[in-house]
Amino acid sequence: MRPEASAIAVEGLVKSYGRTAALRGLTMHAARGTVVCLMGPNGAGKTTVIRVLSTLTRPDGGTAMVCGHDVVQAAGRVRALIGLTGQDAAVDEHLTAMENLWLFARLNGLARRLARSRVAELVEAFDLGPVAERPVRTYSGGLRRRVDLAAALVAAPPVLFVDEPTTGLDPRSRRTLWELIRARARAGSTILLTTQYLEEGDQLADRIYVVDQGRAVAEGTPDELKARIGGERIEVTLAHPAALPLAAAELETLLGGRPEVDAAALTVSVLTDDRPGVLSRAVRGLDEAGVDVTDVRLRRLTLDDVFFAFTGAEPAANGHRR
Amino acid sequence: MTAVAVEVTSLVRRNLIHLRRRPELLVFSIVEPVVLVLLFRYVFGGAVGLSTDLAYPDFMVPGILVQTVTLGSITIGAGLAQDLRLGLMDRFRSLPISRVSVVASHALAGLLRSSVVVLVMALVGVAVGFRPAASPSQALLALILLWLYGVAMAWVTLTLALILRSVEATETIGLGLLFPLTMLSSAFVPIETLPGPLRAFADHQPVTAAIDATRALLLDRPVGGDLWAAVAWSLAIVAVLAPVTAALYQRRIGR
């Protein structure tokens, strides 16, 4: 992709905190008007990318550009183009939603009249009317994130950074936030999203970068990535440990995936695509081979599966890193 | 209005909303000095007053005013620490606003609050027998001096907040640092009565300088070198801490 066509262009970004390397040469691009997702476990470096791009953290090496402006050299320019909404809802707890939005509208340089109409617009769009007069600290988690997102959008920024918007939220709040992010994408913003959830990337992103240990290890549309990983995982629980090798071999022949055996749990699992009938074929095949099966499940891929597929290793040890 | 003025007024407005939402903060910052006034006026005053050349309320109330400004500044640093902790500072720093706006607004809002408390304390002082003799220009000068001194104290607690990055630590260490300074000063006792080393310390520290100048101005006594000492202390504190706070604030950006 040509850099000038990119709203976000990150090349070989390097950042360490003391001896811990957060980013080890991460490269990624986002074309104007697209939603791009950085997906990876805690500590993969996703948040650090967002912090560098939003001028909060200075990189040790590499370059990061937003709409053609270098985030280090032209930080002031970049700040006028971006909205940031983070993991912790960064709004003033003692202020109401309205007061928060008004504050950030004014700090973004909106004149009074414009600020007033913009706040009213956001209260309406984000359905904050019923609580707009109460201090934010009385809000639920989902509601706080909504206010936080609204605060990031107050100046209608062409580029929006959304750092793990739905971590810890209930499914309903999650869907509401997704809808609001989609609406912003339709309005033409370029959105860079980070998430630990495959489903979230699937729902929102045009392109996904899988990030592990400070690097982008895979890139593609959600469909491309899924096609490369396989769609789901079939997990079979056996009655006897002795049948484990036979079951593994049988599943490999039937479904083509590389089987994973968990001897302690008496399970064999294998990645499979979404084709209909895989479950019944697996059951029938094992039955014909004389394997006693106590449970068969089809489970959706987790990020671990994606990681396993792309890196051949378990995800890096969990550890919250900023 | 220029951009910075809009930013600072918007942010000061935010701090004043905090005060409205949590009136107990203001009440506490008034109750505490009132208790001290009553304690020193009616409990210790009888004994201590024997060694002052002024009527004890006249001696003590200017000290209370300076102490109010000094200890009131702790809230300023605590407010900044709160923003640092909540991640709100990240949002502020990602906005196209001036770097000084956030810090300046905390200081300004704190000084506005202190001004209210100083006014209340002056009235309480009058109620317990304080009889100022200042002309309007002397009173104005005293007020300006308290503000200048207040700016210096604000800088002290803002520096603490940037180093400690915790509300509790800023409050605890701020109080641990500033409260002894106000007690080892000329606020409540004539420093001539202190033993040698303590007296030397009390005689050469900013709180005493500010109190002596304020007292002289409010009682229409010759202010002389005290005023210049107080101004010099305040300017010196700001001159030393301004680059320190700037560097600390900057360092956070590298993280």
Image: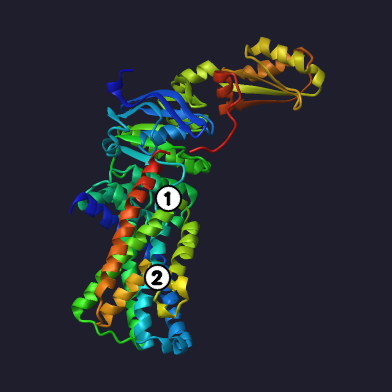
**Which residue is depicted at the point 29% across and 68% down?**
B229
For residue B164, the mark is: none
Q: Taking B57 as reference, is B89 above or below it?
A: above
Q: Is residue A156 above or below residue A139?
A: above
Q: Dot 2 surroundings within 10 Å: few (below 14), some, or many (20 or more)? A: some
Q: Are marks 2 and 1 in contact (CB under 8 Å)?
A: no
Please tell me if label 2 and label 1 are on a single chain.
yes
Q: Nearer the viewer, residue B71 or B7?
A: B71
Q: Vertically, is A320 above or below A7? A: below
Residue A320 at x, y percent in the picture = 54, 38
Chain-order first, disc 2 or disc 1: 2
Q: Nearer the viewer, residue B40 or A134?
A: B40
Residue A272 point in image, percent of width and height: 60, 18
Note whether residue B23 is visible.
no
Question: In what element is the residue under mark 1?
Answer: helix
Residue at 43%, 73% in the rendered image: B199
Q: For mark 1, does the 10 Å Cα neighbourhood hold few (<14), some (14 to 19), or many (20 or more) residues?
A: some
With A47 as the anchor, is A301 left or right in this view?
A: right
Q: Is residue B147 left or right of residue A264?
A: left
Q: Describe the element under mark 2 as helix, strand or loop.
A: helix
Q: CA distance from mark 2 to mark 1?
A: 22 Å
Q: Chain of mark 1?
A: B
Q: Which residue is mark 1?
A: B84
**Quadrant of the frame with the N terminus of chain A:** top left
Query: Position of A293 compared to B83: left or right?
Result: right
Q: Nearer the viewer, residue B106 or A162?
A: B106
Q: Quadrant of residue A162?
A: top left
Q: Which residue is mark 2?
A: B26
Q: Amino acid at mark 1?
A: Leu
Query: Can residue A281 be seen?
Result: yes
